[in-house]
Amino acid sequence: MLTSRLTHHPANQAIRLRNVVCAYCGCELNAQNSTKEHVVGRRFVPKGKLNGHWNLILNACGTCNNRKADLENDISAITLQPQHGEAHPDYDDASKEEARRKAASAISRRTKKPVKDSHESMKLSLPFGQNRGVNFDFISPPQIDERRAFELARLQLSGFFNWITYQQDENRGYWWTGGYHPLMMVRRADYGNKILVDFANTVLNWEPRVLGHTAEGFYSICIRRHPNAECWSWAMEWNGSARLVGFLGDGAVAKAITETLGPLRMDQIELGNGDFVRFRAEVSLAPEDDRLFEPWSK
């Protein structure tokens, strides 16, 4: 149960800000450049999933609004795709159909092809003994361009930070002090990797400033404040299949924490004659061990 440290917002009501500067770039808004912006894009999650659920609505300039929509287009399509041949178990028939539709219409910015045709492959040939070799073929589902993903995360974080710093008498919110420090983006099959688990455990006792789930669980956000420094942790989950985490604010504090996380486990196969292959297997996470979006340590 949440305590008074967090204010409950009605699950079925939108949060509406009337900000007079763009929540993303800070430019002055006027009748010519101001647009209504949904921080959780209505088309970012499956169609209809935000009906009757909260969203953060604010004002943004047309340039930022269009840029964010462009980022959402292919990232939404990719995060809705099945992994390892199976859809997320919470996807209903409508969500699966939406995933198929988006895969056909959205263009991957990595491959320049429709998402449905954007599976990526890699061939690896390695020596094995005398005059012999071993060939490996790797095929992955469509991949998100990491730079674009962290840019979209930064915009969403800017919206939420504007909300928690919003001044009614000024009709504006503010941004964090310091830098933006993305740490990691992982797909669902790797939610249990050592860095992500250590991150969740490390920040769990920080004061939660935003803790939200909406769109029937297709979007989650968490922002926590460091107890003694100008530093915030953040985490978000997109469409039940991708998690992104990082820090805001004091870069030295973020770097010091990051150096305590992990390391990721690497396995090695010896091929003989001094040859070897190193690889990292994905690590799944049991629901009962998932602490990333818990309010605080129990």
Image (cartoon, rainbow, N blue to C red):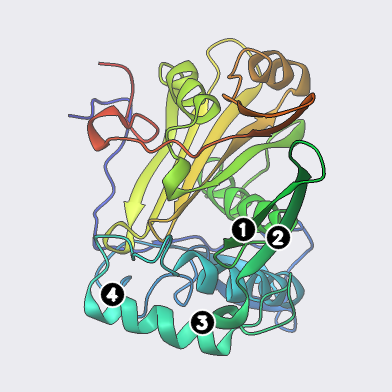
Check disc 3: other Cα within 10 Å, few if <14, some if 14-19, many if 20+.
many
In the rendered structure, are the residues bearing label 2 and label 1 in contact, judged by CB atoms less than 8 Å apart? yes
Residue at label 1? 138
Left or right side of 2 for 155: right
Residue in front for this viewpoint, 57 or 99: 99
Q: Which circle, 2 or 3, is nearer the viewer?
A: 2
Q: Secondary structure at mark 2?
A: strand
Amino acid beneath label 4: Asn
Work out whether mark 4 precedes mark 2 in sequence or the reverse, and give the earlier one.
4
Q: Is residue 4 above or below residue 31?
A: above
Amino acid beneath label 2: Met
Residue in front for this viewpoint, 149 or 228: 149
Work out whether mark 3 precedes mark 1 in sequence or the reverse, and give the earlier one.
3
> For the image shown, how many numbered marks are present on the structure?
4
Residue at label 3? 103
Left or right side of 169 for 12: left
In the rendered structure, are the residues bearing label 4 and label 3 in contact, judged by CB atoms less than 8 Å apart? no
Which residue extends farthest left?
1
Quadrant location of the C terminus? top left
Q: Secondary structure at mark 3?
A: helix
- The residue sitting at 34% across, 29% down in the picture is 291
Q: CA distance from mark 2 to mark 3?
A: 22 Å
Q: CA distance from mark 3 to mark 1?
A: 21 Å
Residue at label 4? 51
Q: Which mark is residue 122?
A: 2
Q: Which mark is residue 192?
A: none
Q: CA distance from mark 2 to mark 1?
A: 5 Å
